[in-house]
Image (tube, rainbow, N blue to C red):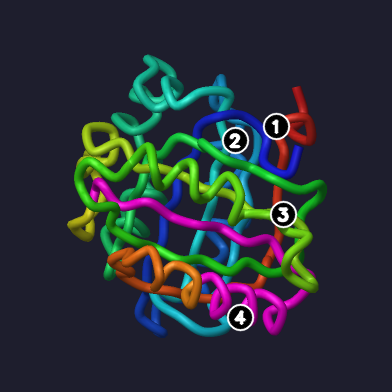
Amino acid sequence: MPIAGKGMLLTSMDIDAADEADFNRWYDREHLEERVAIEGFLEARRYVAHQGAPKYLCLYSTTTIGVFNSAAYKARLANPTEWSQKTMARFKNMIRAVARITISRGNGRGAALGIIRFHPAKGSEESLRSFFRDALDPRKFDGIISMHLIENDPVLSAPAAGIPSVSTGSADWFVLMDAIDVDAASRAALSALIVNSEFKLSVVSTGTYRLMWDLSNSEIPA
């Protein structure tokens, strides 16, 4: 499976340069492992922007989207560590999307990620899914390993306690493209935009990101 599970949390943010070293240390030494250890979480992948904004991006995969409404997850949100409280208060331009993974095609994971965020027209959801089941075929794009569609849940994507203001667009969808490098991700994103323009999608943003590191639940000591 290119993406494990059926649920995903996408978070993205900027941080002031003066706080960046501590922010990265927090993510790498506390936050990723703390989140992936929650019951129902399967893995997390952490990225930094090659082109796009916000600068940092993280994808958390879960068994189902219901994990984000579970007692275990809510308890963690309600009881952040002191380091988490301090760091999260510094987030800027925050995006938080709790989503269903509705399409995931290909085998394997890439060293880079292309991302397209768009707003589906009301009433077009089923036709869009049908369109993307064919369009998100990694064999059509050189250097693309797997491709995915994730759909925000507006209720679960609402602002969470302790996390600063979240960008609007809780009903937006995202196309994710796992690539061998940022050049392949950029080419695929451009090709997808050309195809999508024929479908008249309302594109919010695009970006390409480099993988920093990832962590699976099975790697955390019992």
Nearer to the camera, 2 or 62: 2
Cα distance between the residues tagged 2 and 1: 6 Å
The residue singled out by tag 1 in the image is 217
User: Which residue occupies 44% across, 74% down?
Assistant: 206
Q: Disc 1 marks which amino acid?
A: Asn
Evaluate if marks 2 and 1 touch, with contact meaning CB atoms under 8 Å apart: yes
Q: Nearer the viewer, mark 4 or mark 2?
A: 4
Q: Separation of disc 3 and disc 1 at Cα?
A: 21 Å
Q: Residue at x 34, y 61 (%)?
A: 118
Mark 3 or 1: in front is 3
**Spatial separation of the CA atoms under disc 3 and disc 2:** 22 Å
Residue 114 sits in which quadrant? Answer: bottom right
Q: Are marks 3 and 1 in contact (CB under 8 Å)?
A: no
Residue type marked 2: Val
Q: Work out how far the residue at label 4 is from the one at label 2, CA to CA, in angstroms.
A: 29 Å
| Residue 211 point in image, percent of width and height | 68, 66
Q: Label 3 amino acid?
A: Ser
